[in-house]
Image (cartoon, rainbow, N blue to C red):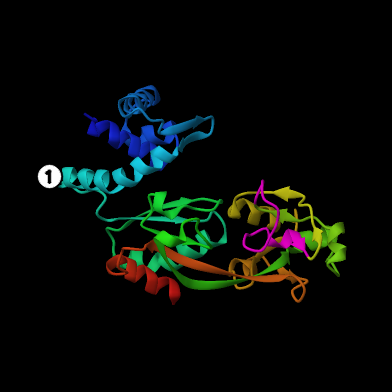
Amino acid sequence: MVDLEKIRIFYHVGIEGSLLAAKKVLNLSSPAISKHITDLENTMKVKLFIRKKKGMILTDDGHRLFAVAKGAVSELEKITQQMQGFDEESDVLRIITTPGIIGYWVLQKLKSVLDKHPSLKLKIYTQDEEVNFSESKADVGFLIKVSDPEHVTMRKIFKFKLNYFASPAYIKRKGVPTSIDDLKNHDILSFYHTQHGSVGNVDWHLKIGETLHVPRITIDSALVQLAAAIQGYGLFACPKDFNILNLFNFIPVLENEITIELDAFMIYPANKLLDGILQEVYQSVIT
């Protein structure tokens, strides 16, 4: 007979993606969690995870078990908490977004919801790679795209128009590029360490026409990248109406030649109604 506690542990490892992250949720040591997973695999006679240095990856059999465990474990944990007289997660909204400009924008928009609901707590997770929303722990996402669009509802909430910008410190150091070809003489900031620039991600500006511009500095944090841009380390790609630009006197660069529009979506489970707090969140982000 399968031990339900081992199923619960398997489920949380599947969500967290690593033993290190799961032990914080389960309050168990990594060796104890690993033994539970191994015991479960031996009982079921299947391999549930591929173990790698960077984490635990579900196998095909693991995905099948996870799909079944997902609803059952969540409901069991919720009922157990209620029977014990508390429900600490009832006023928690879990959000997944990007560590870039969308995350910053979401925080601006949600302040009115937090002010209206003093007991509401936000748990915000960021990810700079394509998200499988169904396997995340989030109630709602604010993203450009997901890898499982067939399982979610996606509502377009905003269109970002992005341009190149330069700070006064950069202009003093390097001047202003006068053409796309002139960019080879300039320093460029990028976001992704492993992806080439292309339409659809925030490094779109690296590939203009047939030219792939090599970034001088790559920083996978919007805040740190902004700090680098302010200090004049390089040209910075950003939405034109990003209000922080005015605070630091950024000026647009080649704005008629280098620009792109990206749609941002509010994402939630396909079988979930847009009501209650989610409806309030939706109203706050579209106004």
Q: Which residue is mark 1?
A: 83
Whether residue 252 is visible: yes
Q: Secondary structure at mark 1?
A: helix
Left or right relative to 185: residue 286 = left
Q: Is residue 98 left or right of residue 8?
A: right
**Relative to 90, does residue 245 appear above or below in the rendering?**
below
In percent of the image, x 59 and y 55: which residue is there? 222
Q: Is residue 193 above or below residue 222?
A: above
- Front-lying residue, 284 or 48: 48
Say which quadrant the C terminus sits in.
bottom left
Label 1: few (<14), some or many (≥20) within 10 Å? few
Q: Magenta-highlighted stretch: main secondary structure? A: loop
Q: Is residue 236 magenta?
A: no
What residue is shown at x 83% (from left), y 58% (from top)?
186
Residue 90: give x, y in percent of width and height. 24, 54
The percent coordinates of residue 129 (x first, y second) are 56, 51
Identify the magenta region. 192-208
Find residue 164 and report its image quarter: bottom right
Q: Nearer the viewer, residue 238 or 260?
A: 260
Kind of residue at disc 1: Met
